[in-house]
Image (cartoon, helix red, strand yellow):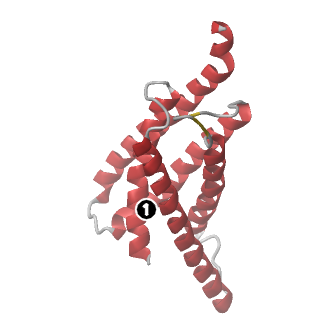
């Protein structure tokens, strides 16, 4: 089950990169919304997220069960483990908010019902939570694939993720400005 979760995690990482870049381009108005291929990829990502969450819940339940049985949870010693679980749970909530904010269609272009400060804060929190979750899980993911000398890969992966996450956060901010400020100036 852990190997399947590692494969799902790697696929999610690739789909996230595609989704983050394409979504940023859509928010900036450089790519039209409602593209069929991006919709299919987003739905595939949701399916993989559900599988990843289900496996994470099962592994967490197993750990809690073992901790209860032994009477030793070692909460301080397992800070990283619980940070993974808590950041994953927070991420699931924030992804649900993300889906709700960007859900709905009129014709072929996806539109928002509103994109004010609460939506912007929610999206920025999602980006930050995603950063924490990926940072804390990238090393075990590389190890699970048997990648030796992963420090070199981690630097490359972190650079790419940083660029994509900064681009995504900037795209949300620009979209917020377009939605709330610039349309008033032009009209």
Q: In which quarter of the image is the N terminus?
A: bottom left
**Front residue (pair 167, 43):** 43
Could you say whether the residue bearing mark 1 is in a helix, strand or loop?
Answer: helix
Residue 140 in sight = no
Q: Work out whether 22 lies above or below 182.
A: below
Instruction: Name the residue carrying label 1.
Output: 9
Q: Which residue is drawn at 28% across and 52% down?
A: 152
Q: Residue at x 61, y 87 (%)?
A: 66
* Residue 183, image x, y percentages: 64, 15
Q: Work out whether 22 lies above or below 151.
A: above
**Quadrant assignment, res 84:** bottom right
* Residue 180, image x, y percentages: 68, 21
Q: Give the residue furthest to the front.
A: 107
Q: Which residue is drawn at 55% across and 64% down?
A: 50
**Quadrant assignment, res 88:** bottom right
Q: Give the residue furthest to the top.
A: 186
Q: Quadrant of the C terminus?
A: top right
* Residue 110, image x, y percentages: 56, 36
**Callout 1: few (<14), some (14-19), or many (20+) C-alpha neighbours within 10 Å?**
many
Side of 118 where 24 appears, left or right: left
């Amino acid at each position: 089950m852990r190997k399947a979760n590692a494969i799902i995690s790697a696929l999610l990482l690739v789909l996230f990169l595609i989704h983050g870049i394409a979504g940023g381009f859509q928010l900036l108005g450089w790519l039209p919304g409602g593209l069929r291929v991006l919709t299919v990829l987003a739905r595939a990502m949701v399916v993989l997220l559900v599988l990843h969450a289900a496996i994470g819940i099962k592994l967490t339940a197993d750990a809690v069960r073992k901790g209860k049985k032994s009477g030793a949870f070692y909460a301080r010693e397992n800070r990283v483990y619980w940070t993974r679980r808590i950041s994953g749970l927070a991420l699931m909530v924030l992804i649900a908010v993300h889906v709700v904010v960007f859900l709905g269609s009129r014709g072929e272009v996806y539109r928002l019902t509103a994109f004010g400060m609460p939506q912007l804060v929610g999206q920025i929190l999602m980006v930050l939570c995603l950063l924490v979750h990926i940072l804390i899980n990238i090393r075990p993911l590389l190890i699970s694939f048997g990648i030796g000398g992963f420090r070199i890969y981690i630097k490359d992966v972190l650079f790419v993720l940083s660029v994509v996450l900064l681009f995504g956060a900037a795209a949300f901010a620009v979209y917020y400005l377009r939605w709330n400020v610039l349309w008033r100036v032009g009209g």
